[in-house]
Amino acid sequence: MSITESELDAARAGWGNALIEVSRAFDEDGFDAARAVAEQMLNDAYGYGFGPVLFKPTMASGEQTFRSTKNGALSYFVGHDNDFPLDGGFGLKGWRAMRSVTAASFIEGDVAMWMGWVILTDKDGQVTTVDKSFGYRKDDAGILRIVLHHSSLPYEP
């Protein structure tokens, strides 16, 4: 069950589409709808069934920089969690488009890693580019699951 480059592309596109769905749900139907879509995103794309997911969100800091639980990831995407008071809801920022640019990838059997840029455009046309790394593992059903998600803003000297 080796992973292919096209599966990596599809997994990234699926992640981006899900993020956009979270934003649209929030804009059209409010917080509860966005939270439900975000929960589905985490269930569909991430590998919590394997154990902790190594997640470093773009805009997280201090003791809550790293999130290994589904609750921590959900809070990052939709906020409104007293356990993570600094989370503003990255998925609620009106995202409407996502594209990625590959810097490099590595595939070894049912494990793959990808790094590059993810370029997000919001409903006002503002563009945010993040440095992103994803680690994937293919589950028994043949679905790629994110087991590592690292994101940061590009360094600007």
Image (tube, grey):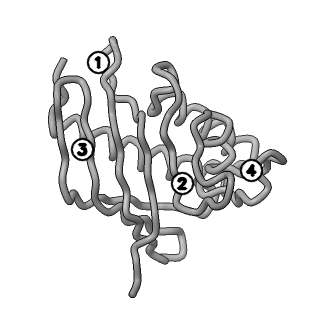
Which residue is labeled 1 in the image?
142
Point out the tag, 3 or 4, that comes first from the N-terminus: 3
Residue under the image location 18 percent in, 54 percent down: 104
Which residue is identified by label 3? 9
Point out the tag, 4 or 2, that comes first from the N-terminus.
Answer: 4
What quarter of the picture does the N terminus occupy?
top left
Which secondary structure lies at badge 1? loop
Crowding around mark 4 (Cα neighbors within 10 Å: few <14, some 14 to 19, many 20+) is some
Q: Mark 2 points at which residue?
A: 57
Callout 2 amino acid: Pro
Nearer the camera: disc 3 or disc 4: 3
The one nearer the camera, 66 or 59, is 66
Asked if the residue at tag 3 contacts the one at tag 2, i.e. Cβ–Cβ closer than 8 Å, the answer is no
Task: Please state the horizontal and vertical placement of residue 99, each as a whole percent of the image.
Answer: 32, 59
Q: Distance between the residues labelled 4 and 1?
A: 34 Å
Please tell me which of labels 4 and 1 falls first in the chain: 4
Q: On the picture, is 121 further left or further right than 105?
A: right
Circle 4 is placed at which residue position?
30
Question: Marks 2 and 1: CB-CB under 8 Å?
Answer: no
Amino acid found under the numbered disc labelled 4: Gly
